[in-house]
């Protein structure tokens, strides 16, 4: 037995567990160690983790719109486009907009913004899929709920160019959001004002 209470094989397992936890966004080495050691010493947490895994495996990301759906099931978001498709960078933006309740159409999640320096290129985003959805629903309004930042503006301009040949009404939420901020980090009132003040883009 060694001083930290772990044999060498269990120490290797613990170390590997820490490495796995570190893969999650926002988890530092210190947090990863706390999670790993809690998991190793708590049977109830092991059960929770099994449940989390089963839940996560029951859901997948729709290849077309980027929303979550049941594995192998139909995508409710794609099936009911409504009069407006709201384009956001990330799932957290969609969640924030839904929470505010200022929009009742469907969503399209790009999976990021165009940022060449960070290797986030248009072909890595769901922009082709957006065009396909726009073509399937002629006359639909495409509302860009993207941050007013260099990346947000570049992405909006790129989408405008791509949708140029489509029969869509393109609009963008008002500049109510602080520069560079996505809807998921601003308050209820700011988000609803940005939506009510949308402009033709
Ligand atoms: Zn979908």
Image (cartoon, rainbow, N blue to C red):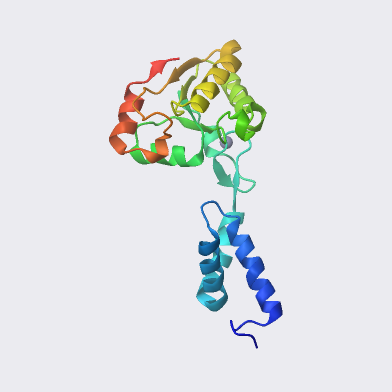
Give percent across and percent down for residue 31.
51, 63
Above or below, 78 against 173 in this view is below
Give percent across and percent down for residue 148.
43, 25
Hey, which quadrant is residue 61 in on the image? top right
Give percent across and percent down for residue 47.
55, 71
Give percent across and percent down for residue 37.
55, 73
Instruction: Please give left or right for residue 145 compared with residue 39 in the image.
Output: left
Judged from this view, the residue extending furthest toward the left is 189
Residue visible at 63% across and 81% down in the picture: 6
Hey, which quadrant is residue 67 in on the image? top right
The quadrant the C terminus occupies is: top left
Hey, which quadrant is residue 154 in on the image? top right
User: Count the marks: how many?
Assistant: 0
Above or below, 72 against 55 in this view is above
The quadrant the N terminus occupies is: bottom right
Above or below, 68 against 196 in this view is below
Image region (quadrant) for ligand 1: top right
Foreground pick, 68 / 199: 199
Instruction: Please give left or right for residue 90 compared with residue 3 in the image.
Output: left
Residue visible at 58% across and 30% down in the picture: 115
Judged from this view, the residue extending furthest toward the front is 3
Judged from this view, the residue extending furthest toward the right is 9
Residue visible at 56% across and 58% down in the picture: 55
Judged from this view, the residue extending furthest toward the bottom is 1
Foreground pick, 190 / 117: 117
């Amino acid at each position: 037995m060694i001083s930290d209470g772990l044999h060498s094989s269990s120490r290797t397992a613990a170390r590997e567990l820490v490495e796995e936890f570190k893969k999650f966004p926002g988890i530092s080495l210190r947090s990863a160690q706390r999670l790993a050691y809690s998991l190793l010493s708590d049977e109830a947490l092991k059960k929770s983790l099994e449940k989390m895994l089963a839940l996560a495996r029951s859901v997948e990301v729709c290849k077309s719109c980027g929303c979550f759906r049941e594995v192998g099931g139909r995508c409710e978001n794609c099936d009911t486009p409504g009069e407006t498709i709201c384009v956001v960078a990330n799932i957290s933006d969609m969640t924030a907009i839904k929470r505010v309740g200022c929009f009742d159409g469907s969503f399209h999640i790009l999976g990021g913004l165009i940022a060449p320096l960070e290797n986030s290129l248009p072909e890595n985003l769901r922009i082709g899929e957006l065009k396909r959805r726009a073509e399937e629903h002629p006359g639909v309004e495409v509302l860009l709920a993207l941050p007013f930042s260099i990346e947000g503006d570049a992405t909006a301009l790129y989408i405008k160019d791509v949708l140029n040949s489509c029969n869509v009404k393109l609009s963008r939420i008002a500049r109510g959001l602080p520069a560079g901020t996505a809807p998921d980090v601003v308050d209820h009132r700011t988000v609803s004002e940005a939506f009510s003040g949308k402009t033709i883009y």
